[in-house]
């Protein structure tokens, strides 16, 4: 039975259209999901929208719409973005869905039954933009002495009756959990930040609001809606049928990865685990806080209005070019910068000129010189082939695959590029176009060797650029059920079986069609 692997993204606030930061997170999660599927795991991938809270209510008022209409309109844009970017999600969870009210109220009741909720008065600072409460000591001073949150957003003094969650009781349990599970918070730098935050002492958390009503009603407490983060975090189990003990809950929970941005690590590694402990539910295995995409060194956000439309970028340069660039250029976990020029330069150099050119040269030569018939493979008899096979194994099986498993995508793609370069060096050195006259038997060996390597290169990069890689593999006649990463190991041990099977099946190449167009500025 394939090992289950459950991955989630953060659910975005649909108070505007998605920006490139949202696209980045969805793409990264999709690369992980596709990579894990190609490793033979049974993957469930959930994303969605976070539709409650003051921020949504205020935005709707500003636009003169009902909140529900705003949610419906904007949530559809997020789902459309996922579809346009080829995001292979299994479920899109909206927090205004009826089943989500059931799940949120159930976790609330479980925390209440534990004795972790009590009624008191909240007095303190709140940032609507972050939907977060802050301690006086965390605030920073902005221009003209105004108080700002540590994220640089405005805060307001808030006084209201509120339910509190006994977060203070969970500090030691959380620290013990972090200690026992060193992979829980990634990357390492975020782990250290969280540990020192918890060590500094946790205060009880205000978890209900009475000053507005756009939220999940608190059970048995008229006038109170849940603090938006309580219901938002619960989305990860709503989709599995919580509170019922469903087969989905049994199979997929706890999640393998919550993929989120660095600004919301505290919510996922302190609040959420404490809620789960309180409700007697197991904790997710990993929370990975990725970095921010910066546009000319500036943070992008809907609220600041310097938003880049990811769909425009995808339309201009192609979905796979955008996906490749983001995973290649940004060291995963760190911040990264994007520009149109950088996308064009990177994709032209690596996809069009290196990999695309290798594929086009190899397949065209087989098509033109051999009528599209795959040549018999007698390779591995020459040192050149042995060397190339060794490089490929090192860069893909021992390079890209373990690096992608660790979510080190840029280094993994670096290995892949070295494997591509090695093939290009091989084709240049062997010059099969000359061998046609000089030594046609040798030409066949070289082209067969290149065909073998091309298959592995395409399978290895498919999680990043699924559409282009699959179009190439389609042209090469590689059956869909053979496009898994395990076949890269098998190929090295036994390159003949699949190749002979394909040859014997009578497959012939058609005129190859390039899949990596050169991009223009
Ligand atoms: O935080 N670069 O929603 P959100 C990279 N609803 N990632 C970015 C980014 C950028 N410039 N800007 C935002 C929320 N993100 C909550 C989440 S989860 C239970 C609730 C990331 O719409 C951000 O870090 O503000 C987060 O992971 C996601 O986009 C949604 O952000």
Image (cartoon, rainbow, N blue to C red):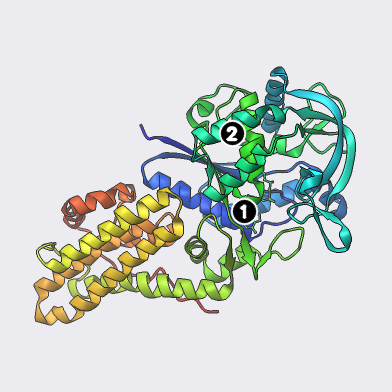
- Residue 287 in which image quadrant: top right
Q: Residue at x 45, y 40 (%)?
A: 43
Instruction: Report the number of discs.
Output: 2
At label 1, counting other C-alpha atoms closer than 10 Å, the crowd grade (few under 14, some 14-19, many 20 or more) is some
Question: Could you say where residue 194 lies in the image, as x and y percent from the top left?
Answer: 62, 43
Q: Can see residue 384?
A: yes
The answer to whether any part of residue 284 appears in the image is: no
Dot 2: within a 10 Å radius of its alpha carbon, few (fewer than 14), some, or many (20 or more) residues? some
Q: Nearer the viewer, residue 485 or 342?
A: 342
Q: From what the image shows, is residue 342 above or below residue 468?
A: below
| 34 left or right, relative to 66 | left
> Where is residue 399 shown, x and y percent of the image?
34, 56
On the rendered image, what quadrant is the N terminus found in? Answer: top left
On the image, numbered disc 1 is attached to which residue? 80
Q: Is residue 321 above or below residue 46?
A: below
Residue at image location 46% in from the left, 71% down from the top: 347
Determine whether the residue tagged by mark 2 lies in a helix, strand or loop.
helix
Using the image, determine if residue 454 lies above or below residue 14: below
Describe the element under mark 1 as helix, strand or loop: helix
Q: CA distance from mark 2 to mark 1?
A: 40 Å
Which of 22 and 80 lies nearest the eye of the viewer? 22
Q: How far from the left and from the top, in percent, is residue 257?
A: 52, 41
* Residue at which label 2 appears: 175
Of the image marks 2 and 1, the number of the one nearer the N terminus: 1
Residue at 62% from the left image edge and 55% from the top image edge: 22
Residue drawn at x 60%, y 41% as measured from the top left: 195
């Amino acid at each position: 039975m394939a090992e289950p692997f459950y991955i989630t993204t953060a659910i975005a606030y649909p108070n505007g259209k998605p920006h490139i930061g949202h696209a980045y997170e969805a793409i990264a999660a999709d690369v992980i999901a596709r990579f894990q599927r190609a490793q033979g795991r049974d993957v469930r991938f959930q994303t969605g929208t976070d539709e409650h809270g003051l921020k949504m209510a205020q935005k709707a008022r500003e636009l003169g719409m009902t909140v529900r209409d705003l949610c419906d309109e904007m949530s559809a844009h997020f789902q459309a973005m996922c579809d346009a970017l080829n995001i292979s999600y299994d479920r899109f969870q909206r927090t205004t869905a009826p089943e989500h009210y059931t799940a949120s109220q159930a976790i609330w009741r479980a925390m209440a039954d534990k004795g972790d909720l009590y009624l008191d008065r909240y007095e303190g600072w709140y940032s609507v933009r972050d939907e977060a409460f802050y301690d006086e000591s965390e605030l920073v001073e902005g221009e003209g002495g105004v108080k700002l949150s540590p994220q640089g957003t405005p805060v307001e003094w808030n006084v209201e009756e509120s339910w509190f969650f006994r977060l203070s009781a969970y500090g030691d349990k959380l620290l013990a959990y972090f200690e026992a599970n060193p992979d829980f918070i990634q990357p390492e730098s975020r782990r250290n930040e969280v540990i020192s935050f918890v060590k500094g002492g946790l205060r009880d958390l205000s978890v209900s609001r009475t000053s507005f009503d756009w939220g999940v009603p608190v059970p048995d407490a008229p006038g109170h809606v849940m603090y938006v983060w309580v219901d938002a975090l619960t989305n990860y189990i709503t989709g599995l049928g919580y509170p019922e003990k469903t087969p989905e809950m049994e199979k997929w929970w706890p999640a393998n990865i919550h993929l989120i941005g660095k600004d919301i690590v505290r919510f996922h590694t302190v609040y959420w685990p404490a809620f789960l402990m309180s409700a007697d539910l197991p904790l997710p295995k990993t929370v990975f806080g990725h970095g921010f995409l910066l546009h000319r060194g500036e943070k992008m956000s809907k609220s600041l209005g310097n938003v880049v439309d990811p769909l425009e970028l995808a339309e201009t340069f192609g979905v796979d070019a955008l996906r490749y660039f983001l995973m290649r250029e940004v060291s995963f976990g760190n911040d990264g910068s994007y520009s149109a020029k950088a996308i064009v330069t990177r994709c032209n150099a690596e996809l069009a000129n290196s990999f695309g050119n290798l594929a086009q040269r190899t397949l065209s030569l087989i098509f033109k010189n051999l009528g599209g018939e795959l040549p018999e493979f007698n390779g591995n008899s020459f040192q050149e082939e042995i060397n190339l096979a060794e490089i490929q194994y090192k860069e893909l099986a021992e390079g890209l695959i373990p690096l992608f498993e660790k979510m080190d995508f840029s280094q993994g793609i670096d290995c892949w590029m070295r494997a591509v370069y090695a093939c290009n060096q091989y084709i240049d050195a062997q010059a099969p176009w000359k061998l046609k006259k000089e030594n046609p038997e040798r030409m066949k060996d070289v082209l067969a060797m290149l065909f073998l390597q091309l298959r592995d290169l395409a399978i290895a990069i498919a999680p990043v650029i699924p559409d282009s890689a699959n179009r190439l593999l389609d042209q090469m006649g590689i059956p869909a059920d053979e496009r898994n990463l395990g076949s890269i190991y098998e190929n090295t041990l036994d390159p003949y079986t699949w190749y002979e099977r394909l040859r014997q099946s009578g497959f012939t190449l058609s005129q190859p069609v390039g899949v990596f167009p050169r991009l223009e500025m």
